[in-house]
Image (cartoon, rainbow, N blue to C red):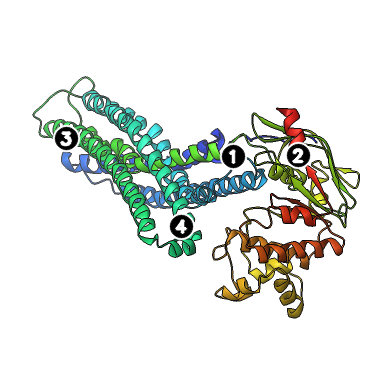
Amino acid sequence: MAAVPRGQPFDPPVETSFARRRIGMVAVLSPLVWPGQAALLAWIISDMIAGRDLPWHAIPAFLALACLRAPLDWLSMRHAQAAARTLVASLRHRLIAATVARCPGGKDGTNAAEIASLLGEKATLVAVWAERVVPIQARVMVVPLAILLLVASQSWTAALALALTGPAIPLFMALIGYGARAVARAQLVETGALNRLLIDRVAALTDIRLLGAEGLAMQDLAARSTSLRERTMKVLGLAFLSSTVLEFMAALGVAMVAVQMGLSLLGLVSWGGWGGPISPFGAVFVLLITPDFYQPLRDLASVWHDRAGAEAALAEYRAEIGRDLPAIPGLWTAPGRMADGPLDWRDLVLEPCPGLRIPVADGRIAAGEAVALVAPSGAGKSSLLLALCGLAPVASGTIRMGGLPLADDTAAAIRTALGWIPQSPRFPSGSLRQFLTGGDDVPAERLAQVLRQVRAEGIVAALPDGLDTRLGETGGGVSGGEARRLLIARALLNPPRILLADEPTADLDADTAAAVVQALLALRRQGTGVLVATHAPALVAAMDRRLDLQAAMELAG
């Protein structure tokens, strides 16, 4: 069997230099219009101070620049929003594709609650980063430097004040940012943990009520909620701290420049300009544009906690998408013609997780026969069934169906011919009726007969909407044994070529287990091959033959 690829690279489109450069170029256009408007205002005011005629032709130019800023702001916002949508769609698509493509077996599986958290609120954090933080970061890189050069053209002292106070702001924010990043990451981890706990408690709600453990479950949820609230308040506290530091430094810088420009306009100082006093035009111009030197830094402080949260979320995306886990072969390949013939495996060495290899005995199962797969716990029964479906990695060996080897281009055709009953069943989002019938038009009498055959009619009757109930992914409202009986009913309605069942009678009483055994034998009589992994002596005795994996384990030891 061909080796399957592990992991994949992570390269969100908005993180490429081209995308960031394009967003940044649009974002800095609007702030750079204001110095032109400020120069026109300073011209008008300086002429008024000198008693000269008002330059009326400067007013239309000022209004034209003002009208230019609005479409530039709109274009910048539209560009950033489009980039945010592209990034989030790409992340979600790649995360879903990576999750779906991974083999379900192994000890390092994927948690549905954590994936849902990444697809939901954590994706929103990344969208905010692309929509707000990236444009602001571009302005921080360009606008303060442009303002500093314009101020320096009029006053070296004012430029010196900006040069001294400006770098202190990023320095303090960087120091705060190190702590903010760790706190934000801890908050996101706690969010995922709370989602996971909530999903587990909802799935086990019936059992919790039967055990009278509602109080303990509420205490667990309350403790997790309190922990999340505390971590969220730490994130907000650091955000307020960074804003306070920035506002103090910005106010100090503006005050230093304003005092000097005011004294210069009053004629109380005769220095500060290049070679003499600052001109009235220069003083007014510097006063008007100095606040814009700090405005991008203020904007950055307002989104600093968003940046920290987005970076933590992106780190989780990178870790989850790039996890070094085996992929399901042939997942995106069209099945084509359904495979037919006996299912056999030779020289197979399972690899349920990295570093663990389990040799298994050769085996074969044909249509119309029933085989019991017997071995001690941990000997590889479940892993073998997953491998036969192409859902678990193998280190070496071959799996064939009707002479067709299991590979990327044949796995879909082989899986189409197989039925699968796992120990922990999963259900799609549709109704139970759709799941059982596969969307086919099955007569109500036939459906009721099959449910009675596996003693599942009581299960359906206890559900709130009967066959129209949506059980949810984990089968909320039914136990593990009941879920497996529903899967056997589905196999009876849509008989596969080969049915693979993992402990189908576990957690069942003797009478119900006997009914399930009879249902499996009914499948065999219909021409379906049945391969069951089991410890139950009654089920082993009912099968045509048994395949013992223990000998292979002893050889491996």
Q: Which residue is mark 2?
A: 549
Could you say which disc has been placed on residue 255 in the image?
Answer: 3
Q: Amino acid at mark 3?
A: Ala
Callout 1: SS:
loop
Residue name at image x 84 percent, y 42 percent: 363
User: Closer to the N terminus: mark 4 or mark 3?
Assistant: 4
Instruction: State which mark lies toward you, 3 or 2.
Output: 2
Residue at mark 1 to residue at mark 4: CA–CA distance: 22 Å
Above-or-below relation of 438 to 319: below
In which quadrant of the rendered image does the N terminus lie? top right
Q: Position of residue 380 (x, y in %)?
A: 70, 40
Judged from the image, the secondary structure of the residue bearing numbered disc 2 is: loop
Please say if the residues under marks 3 and 2 sit with CB atoms less than 8 Å apart.
no
* Circles 4 and 3: CB atoms closer than 8 Å: no
| Mark 4 closeness class: few <14, some 14–19, many ≥20 residues within 10 Å | some
Amino acid type of the residue tagged 4 in the rendering: Arg
Question: Which one is closest to the eye, mark 1 or mark 2?
Answer: 2
The residue positioned 62% from the left and 57% from the top of the image is 426
Is any atom of residue 233 visible in this view? yes
- Mark 1 closeness class: few <14, some 14–19, many ≥20 residues within 10 Å: few
Q: Is residue 35 left or right of residue 78?
A: left
- Between circles 1 and 3, the one closer to the viewer is 1
Q: Quadrant of residue 55?
A: top left
Amino acid type at circle 2 is Leu
Instruction: Check disc 1 and report the residue beneath it.
Output: 107
Q: Position of residue 125 (x, y in %)?
A: 44, 47
Quarter location, residue 157: top left
Residue neighbourhood size for the residue with mark 2, other residues' Cα within 10 Å, grouped as few (<14), some (14–19), many (≥20): many
- Label located before the other in sequence (1 or 3): 1
> Image quadrant for the C terminus?
top right
**Which residue is disc 4 drawn over?**
201
In this view of the protein, which residue sits in the foreground, 534 or 281?
534
